[in-house]
Image (spheres, rainbow, N blue to C red):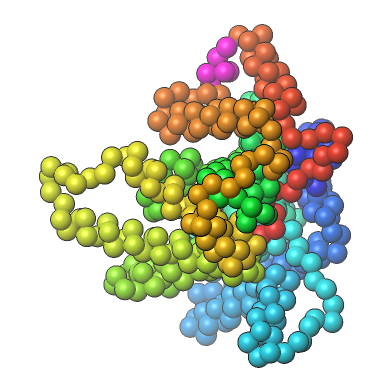
Amino acid sequence: MLFNSIDYLVFFPIVVLVYYLIPRKVRHVWLLVVSYYFYMCWNVKYAILMFASTVITYLSGIGIEYVRDRDSYSRVRAKLIVAASFVSNLGILVLFKYFAWILDNLNNIFHTSVSLPFSLLLPVGISFYTFQALSYTCDVYRGDVKAETNPVCYALFVSFFPQLVAGPIERTGRLLPQIKELGKGSFSWENMRDGLCLMLYGMFLKIVIADRAANLVDGIFDHYRDFGFIELAIAAVMFAFQILCDFNGYTIIARGSAQILGIQLSDNFRQPYLATSIHDFWRRWHMSLTSWFTDYLYIPLGGSRKGQLRKLLNTMIVFLTSGLWHGASWHFVAWGMLHGIYQNVDTLLRSGKREKADSSGRGRLPGIVKLIGTFIFVDIAWVFFRAPSCSAAIGIFRQMAKSFRGDGLSGVGIEWYDWLILLTALLIMIIVDIVHEKKVIEIRKMIYKRRVGVRWLIYLAAVWCIILFGIYGAEYDASQFIYFQF
């Protein structure tokens, strides 16, 4: 079930209405049932995998807390429980997401033709809920949180439908306490208002910008040999905004949906294309995944505590793993490797600048130059992310070098009025990002201060613009959010 579908527009109001009408003590059960229904709308069978991951990590948490810190032998047993939880959960992830890819690579290496006797479809959102469940196991082992004994609360923590299939990847200490308090909360007009505003803006990003940009990006990248540098560069820039608006749009709708139910989800993006360095970009992009890898991979590997060379190696391992997390394909690994190289070069340049720094600050680049340079490097990596393979990505760059201009942008699924709508919508998004970045005003609070009639005029105008300029219609198939495949 997609957020930008009629199904969700029917499903969600029913969920909210029943949630606030039923007794508070059964709200957890209701949300758990609808969360599983939400997930099973894609494939009923794969709900079994989520249930298995939930049971494994739930029992692991109880087991770890029972044996931890009793004596040295018990601490070893606690580590074995953690290992068993990771092996079993990652084993499920590898089987369904990576096994066929690994087998294909082994066939290529050894010139064999071994194939699976059965087909495996990638379960939607498996990487997201697996990582969230595993972070709970680690947090219990570290003593950061107590093991949850209520199976319904814990199952809802893993399967909470707004953030289930594309994040944000919530931490135990942030989401689980909110879930446990659901039975005590009451209806809030403020939460309803804020949540609906968030959902409106998320819809704007998704169906007005991302889905319209997708027509251009797909039309050019899928036939890149017919175009030149200008067209391919435009498509690359538009994909950068497509994936931001698609993924951030999902996150914002998820946050709005959760807020109406009384739960605050983490913000996953903070104006990433206003970053002035690669380090800064990764402090702003998919922040929940970045912090997950930092806490559960980078720091356990040694972080920056074991010298510069080890820090650079650990950084590269994290980004290669991040690339592989996004998909079982070498072009995702190449995307991660590029960002690992960017990050390490940025680290080396920063350390060199610190050694040569003087009080006058001479030699510093203007902020706008840093911003544009960072965006260009990020966008180059996005070509590998978007291309179906490494060879296709390299082919796109070769085509850009070979031909400065192709046959133009006609015939790629976007007309002049689509350009006008797309560029206007992008301008609105950029202005909103700059306002948030500079903290000039808080747009929502400014709207809330208006008179009732003015507020409702703004709300209705926003809804009307989404209906009028969104990509949908009689032949429209609600497009899947890009990050659902991860």
The image shows residue 18 at horizontal and vertical percentages of 83, 36
Q: Which quadrant is home to the C terminus?
A: bottom right
> Looking at the rendering, which quadrant does residue 313 occupy?
bottom left
> Looking at the rendering, which quadrant does residue 356 occupy?
bottom left
The answer to whether residue 206 shows anywhere in this view is no
Residue in the image at 41% along x and 71% along y: 314
Residue in the image at 74% along x and 48% along y: 480
Q: Is residue 110 left or right of residue 14?
A: left
The residue lying toward the viewer, choosing from 384 and 62, is: 384
The image shows residue 160 at horizontal and vertical percentages of 71, 50
Majority SS type along the magenta span: helix
The answer to whether residue 21 shows anywhere in this view is yes
The residue lying toward the viewer, choosing from 435 and 183, is: 435
Residue in the image at 40% along x and 60% along y: 342
Any magenta on residue 35?
Answer: no
Count of numbered marks: 0
Query: Which range is magenta?
Result: 445-450
The image shows residue 135 at horizontal and vertical percentages of 57, 63
Residue at the outermost left position: 359
Any magenta on residue 448?
Answer: yes
> Looking at the rendering, which quadrant does residue 100 occupy?
bottom right
Residue in the image at 54% along x and 74% along y: 68
56 to 410, vertically: above or below? below
Q: Is residue 171 left or right of residue 453?
A: left
The image shows residue 124 at horizontal and vertical percentages of 74, 58
The residue lying toward the viewer, choosing from 109 and 465, is: 109
Q: Is residue 314 left or right of residue 85?
A: left
The residue lying toward the viewer, choosing from 226 and 302, is: 226
